[in-house]
Image (spheres, helix red, strand yellow):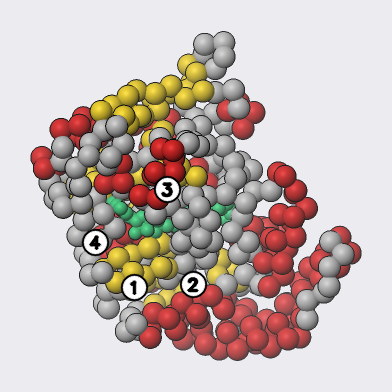
Amino acid sequence: MSVNIVIGTQWGDEGKGKIIDIFAGEADVVVRSQGGNNAGHTVVSIGEVYKLHLVPSGILYKNTLCMLGAGVVIDPKVLIGEIDMLQERGVSFDNFKIDPRAHVIMPWHITLDGLSEIARGASDIGTTKRGIGPCYCDKYERSGLRIYDLTHPEIFREKALSVGKLRNDIITKIYGEAPLNLDEIIDTYIEYGKKLLQYVDDVSVLTEKALKENKNILFEGAQATLLDIDYGTYPYVTSSHPISAGVCIGTGVGPTVIQKVYGVAKAYTTRVGKGPFPTELEGETGEYIRQRGAEFGTTTLRPRRTGWFDAVIVRHAVRTNGLTDLVINKLDTLAGIKTLKICTHYIKPDGTIIEDFPPALEELTDCKPVYEDFDGFDEDISGCRSFDELPETAKVYMKRLEELIGCKVSFIGVGPDRTQQIVI
Ligand code: GDP
Ligand code: IMO
Ligand code: MG
């Protein structure tokens, strides 16, 4: 029996989907606990590429129970589209469940996400505009609509009409935009509810049952530590808790059952959307990494910002997630760079050394990253399957990286495919 979490340690897109797909080969159950279709998880299996936004990355294994927990926010149109697309490619949904407590992303959430970004002007967050923030706002304001409501038409009609009118007031009176057609929306969403009803079940109860049967359970993180609403670079964050503690809240299990927490990082750093990024590279090397690593967003196709590996943020992730193991993906992307750099700590103009990631942006603005340099490697390492096969310079880089973050590196990614992984 194993009960493990896979979580992002940087600003997302670390290759969590790939790792979850690999681990899911041994898992009986895969559960997602937070976020929505702001996530984009890429899985490459025998040359086939799957881009998943809501459905857990364990779905490619026929017998694995895949579930969306109470903490996930669900756009039913997107979910149905994803199920249809995967079913057309032969993926089975016989073992797929959604918790009735999960909140529903409504069209007004998407509209308001877009409008509030425009209203923020130059200080926009750079959200995915999928309605994530406004949906979580309604949840915490206690006016959200849940999957339970969606799948009970009469309850849904009444609640959606009431909250929809209020949201239309904001759209028209605050933003001066045209109101949404509530009757049309409600009719369409009731049809979505009918399609999703077959999947609705209590994820907390099903997970407990699996625990009692000594099954292998994997919790799939979306987004990442530095996008966490409390421990990320607020306000340039998402609206949920991508850190490991969010798993318990978002799936309805207690913390005592968790055995291992795997943090996933890239061998460098990327970020989509706005917000601080101390080790960002703006010149030729940044572009080289973007092109070689195909660093373009899975969800919004935006070019990802790229930079050196930042040990300060990953140490922050080790602490806030209680990581037991680290996975470093995309080491292969760094091939061909003459000198590699790792940020070991930050320094302030008055000489103060910062080793722990600061809690406020204002504290971060005058922090400068301090780097250690490493000789790069030119070899194509995508065929390496053991640490010993790596070029000597790549070994030195990885060993020092492990030392700086203070957490055991258990896997190194050398390519996007399931098989392109070094197990240590
Ligand atoms: P996620 O959101 O954390 O699941 O990551 P994404 O799927 O958004 O982005 C990671 C990208 O890197 C995907 O295109 C993966 O196929 C790819 N990838 C993952 N691991 C590796 C690796 O070790 N090497 C290379 N070259 N690509 C990788
Ligand atoms: P995965 O799971 C990278 C970023 C957005 C934006 C901020 C807030 O693929 O790693 P939101 O739409 O959530 O309100 O946007 O968070 N963001 C991600 N960046 N990977 C993700 O997910 C992300 N999900 C949200 O770009 O900066
Ligand atoms: Mg992604």
The furthest residue to the top = 350
User: What mark, if any, has residue 418 been given in the picture?
Assistant: 4
User: What mark, if any, has residue 366 been given in the picture?
Assistant: none
The image shows residue 139 at horizontal and vertical percentages of: 65, 62
Badge 3 density bin: few <14, some 14–19, many ≥20, Cα 10 Å: some
Sequence order check, earlier mark of 3 and 4: 3
Alpha carbon of mark 1 to alpha carbon of mark 4: how far? 14 Å
Asked whether the beta carbons under mark 1 and mark 2 sit within 8 Å of each other, the answer is: no
What's the amino acid at mark 3?
Answer: Arg
Q: Which residue is mark 2?
A: 99
Q: Secondary structure at mark 2?
A: loop
Above-or-below relation of 244 to 199 = above
Above-or-below relation of 175 to 13 = below
Of the two numbered discs 1 and 4 in the rendering, the one whose residue sits closer to the viewer: 4
Ligand 1 occupies quarter: bottom left
Sequence order check, earlier mark of 1 and 2: 1
**Residue drawn at (75%, 60%) of the image:** 115
Of the two numbered discs 1 and 2 in the rendering, the one whose residue sits closer to the viewer: 1
What's the amino acid at mark 2?
Answer: Asp
